[in-house]
Amino acid sequence: MIGIEEKDMIINRIPAKTWNHLHMNQSKVGEVVINRTGELNASVNDVSLIDDGKLNNGELDNIIGGCGQEITEAAKKSQTEPVYYITDKKNDGFVRLDFNYGKSNADINVVGIETKENASIDVYMDFNGDKDGEGFAAVQTRLYAAKDSVIRLIQIQRVGAETTFINDIGGYCEDGARIELVQLYLSGKNRYEGCEIKLAGDGSSMSAEIGYVAAGKERLDMNYCVRHIGKKTECAINAAGALRDTAFKLFRGTIDFIKGSAGSVGNEKEEVLLIDEKCVNQTIPIILCAEEDVVGNHGATIGKPDEELLFYLESRGIPAQECYNMLAAAKLLAVCGKIPDDGIRNEIHDYIKEVY
């Protein structure tokens, strides 16, 4: 492991720039310090894994995530050792990866997940940190879904209150393959979420169900991009969350129909609840189209809590602060309900209820 220090790392670039004055084209991470591989505890539950040492004969290096090339280069410079989870079976169980962060962090991990033809796997990632933790941590995840296979990736992010965290995902789908994401972003001072999926094969698809909350002075910065390359590909990105206090959130969502992706469909939707007057929300949905025979839809619902609903709840003796907590929790619990495993779903459900 080689220590890395970089200033002003540029990440989360959108594929097509908009007006620079809006400061939404990309983001800058002020200081990146990496000097160790993060602590990772893995448990394999009723999953058949094979160990061929590398992801699809080296395809890991060719998959770029939504955060971009600079964090990938930093991971390579650090020489952190990737870990791989590769299967050639349809699995009923799951792999759970617990990333444990302390009070002072300078960590990076690289994970590769591959499903061979007709295989399937569920992988849970829990990014869990000391509640007062600070510093920097990053996780890169690379997904490769071979023909007619399925990868389900579930991520729960609850890092320390003063932690800067980068979560970078890159994926590739062959014919008929599917990648499904369920993601809950719950805490952290500066959180950068990037995801780019290439639907290269005909009939391939992806979905992302995203729930988030940001409070205090937290910053949540997201960049999702789906490249429709094959014919009759499909994507669905659904994000829902709540902002409080002076929190800042930026969501970039790009659906890119590349020439030759005839018959493809892309849908993107976001719902944002603005609980306080001084929170800042930015949303930039983008549809790029180089193919005529496609369907692309995007929409955003942004607003404050309904006054009549608040009046009703308060008239039943529920304090205003608790009403706001209930509304924020409802956004998260809706996404939590999409977690496949009962035990993990109940664990996260109880955590959300306890915190909110």
Image: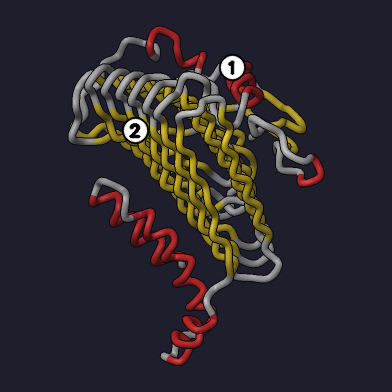
Position of residue 313 relative to residue 258, above or below, is: below
| Measured Cα–Cα span from mark 2 to mark 1 | 22 Å
Q: Residues within 10 Å of mark 1 (few under 14, many from 20)?
A: some
Is tag 2's residue or tag 1's residue first in the polypeptide sequence? Answer: 2
Mark 2 lies on residue? 42
Q: Which mark is residue 76?
A: 1
Q: Quadrant of residue 355?
A: bottom left
Question: Left or right: where does residue 152 sit relative to residue 31?
Answer: left
Q: In this orientation, does residue 227 appear?
A: yes
Question: Camera-side residue: 185 or 160?
Answer: 185
Residue type pointed to by label 1? Lys
Residue at (56%, 25%) from the top-left corner?
290
Position of residue 325 relative to residue 310, above or below, is: above
Tell me the quarter of the image containing the N terminus: top right
Residue at (60%, 47%) from the top-left corner?
251
Q: Residues within 10 Å of mark 2 (few under 14, many from 20)?
A: few
Question: Camera-side residue: 283 or 85?
Answer: 283
Residue 216: percent from left, percent from top:
64, 62
